[in-house]
């Protein structure tokens, strides 16, 4: 019995080491490929002026929407019933996926495990 458990543990550890080695190798390959693309395409982060122009524009849009709420919400008049149903279904799916993630994270359907309470 003990030999079977040791054999299983040895196989599991060797598989995990193999997967770790492959993961490290491929992450290095992706990193080097990304460097080459970055250099060849001449990519660079946006400048401070770009950030300022984008966020200034967003700020002005938010202020104008806050000052004229009725005109800002005028697009609601043009919403079709099919769009409401479609986006409502998307919202329900997102809420369900979020709830599923919570259940998986807690490892319980309801409530969190209380590790502080000892009997």
Image (tube, rainbow, N blue to C red):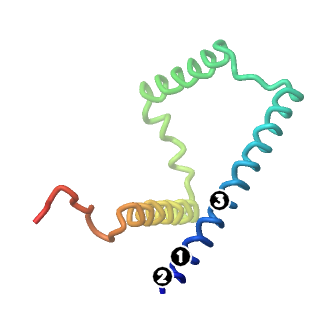
Foreground of the two, 115 or 6? 6
Examine the rendered structure and indicate whether residue 44 appears above or below residue 96. Answer: above
Residue at image position (80%, 44%) is 29
Residue picked out by circle 2: 2
Using residue 115 as the reference point, say whether residue 60 is left or right of it: right
Which residue is at the far left? 119
Foreground of the two, 114 or 72? 114
Residue 43 x, y percent position in the rendering: 80, 26
Using residue 103 as the reference point, say whether residue 83 is left or right of it: right
Q: Secondary structure at mark 1?
A: helix
Callout 3–callout 2 Cβ contact below 8 Å: no
Residue picked out by circle 3: 17
Examine the rendered structure and indicate whether residue 105 appears above or below residue 49. Answer: below
Label 1 neighbour load within 10 Å: few <14, some 14-19, many 20+: few
Using residue 21 as the reference point, say whether residue 115 is left or right of it: left
Examine the rendered structure and indicate whether residue 73 appears above or below residue 93. Answer: above
Residue 6: mark in rendering: 1
Residue 11 x, y percent position in the rendering: 62, 72
Q: Secondary structure at mark 3?
A: helix
Quarter-of-image position of residue 47? top right
Q: Earlier in the sequence, mark 1 or mark 3?
A: 1
Q: Quadrant of the C terminus?
A: bottom left
Q: Secondary structure at mark 2?
A: helix
Callout 2–callout 1 Cβ contact below 8 Å: yes
Label 2 neighbour load within 10 Å: few <14, some 14-19, many 20+: few
Real-space Cα separation, disc 1 to disc 3, in angstroms: 16 Å
Residue at image position (70%, 54%) is 21
């Amino acid at each position: 019995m003990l030999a079977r458990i040791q054999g299983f543990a040895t196989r599991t550890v060797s598989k995990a080491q193999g997967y770790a080695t492959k993961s490290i190798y491929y992450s290095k390959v992706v990193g080097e490929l990304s460097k080459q693309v970055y250099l060849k395409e001449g990519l660079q982060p946006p400048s401070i002026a770009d950030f300022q122009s984008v966020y200034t524009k967003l700020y002005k849009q938010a202020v104008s929407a806050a000052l004229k709420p009725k005109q800002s919400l005028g697009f609601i008049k043009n919403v079709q019933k099919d769009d409401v149903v479609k986006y409502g279904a998307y919202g329900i799916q997102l809420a369900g996926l979020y709830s599923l993630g919570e259940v998986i994270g807690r490892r319980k359907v309801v409530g969190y495990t209380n590790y502080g309470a000892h009997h």
